[in-house]
Image: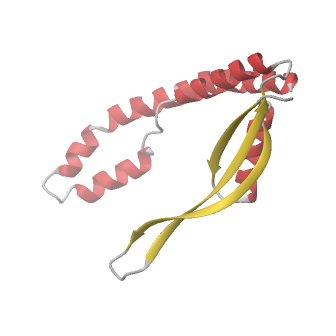
Amino acid sequence: MANYEFKETKCYPSDAARNAEQQLWNDFGWEVTGMDTRQVFTHTDSQGTKHYSTSTYIQLRRDKEHRNYAKLAELQDTYFSTLNMVPRKPTPLGAYIFQSICCIPLFGLGIIFLLLIPALKKKIKKYNEAVATLQPRADAAREQAKQLV
C-alpha cells in the first residue's frame, strides 16, 4: 500500500494560475487529488457592502515510496528556499518620483522623498541582482526534479 503525504496550496482563481500551480507541483512529484474555489469574507465597507476574497485551493498528494522521493523533496526545498531569498520588490522609481513631485508643496516632504531616490536605486539594483542570480538556481532545481518524476 502506498504511503502518501498530502498538501494544499492556494492560488489565484484563473485557468492560467491554476495550470501554472499544478505544473509547478507536478514537477516535484505531486499529483492533484482535488480542487475547489472558496470565497472568504474580508470586510464590510461604509455602505454596508460585504467584500469577499476568492481563491482556488488545490489538494495534492505525493507518494513517499516513489524511487526518487528523497531527491524530489530536497529539490523542492531548494527551489522554494532559493526563491525566498529574493528580497521584496521595491517601489518602481517612476512612482516614487511622481509621489515626490506631488509632495513638494506639502511642507517639503517631496524634497525628502527626492533625497531618498539614491537609496531606492540601490534597492532596485540589489533586487535585480538577486533575481538574476537566484532565479536560475531555482529553475535548475525545478528542471532537475522534472527529470526525476
Left or right, 51 with reference to 141: left
Q: Which of the two residues, 2 or 21, is positioned nearer the viewer here?
A: 2
Question: In this rendering, is residue 6 above or below 46?
Answer: above
Farthest residue, direction bottom: 47
Question: In this rendering, is residue 16 above or below 78?
Answer: below
Left or right, 5 with reference to 47: right
Farthest residue, direction front: 1
Left or right, 68 with reference to 79: right
Q: Which of the two residues, 128 or 115, is positioned nearer the viewer here?
A: 128
Question: In this rendering, is residue 102 above or below 123?
Answer: below
Q: Where does residue 127 sit, x and y in percent of width and height? A: 49, 30
Q: Quadrant of the C terminus?
A: top right
User: Residue drawn 70% across and 37% down?
Assistant: 6
User: Residue drawn 61% across and 62% down?
Assistant: 38
Question: In this rendering, is residue 20 above or below 101?
Answer: above
Q: Which of the two residues, 63 or 124, is positioned nearer the viewer here?
A: 63
Q: Quadrant of the N terminus?
A: top right
Q: Where does residue 132 sit, x and y in percent of width and height? A: 61, 26
Q: Where does residue 86 sit, x and y in percent of width and height? A: 52, 29
Q: Where does residue 31 sit, x and y in percent of width and height? A: 81, 40
**Quarter-wise, where is residue 133 in the image?**
top right
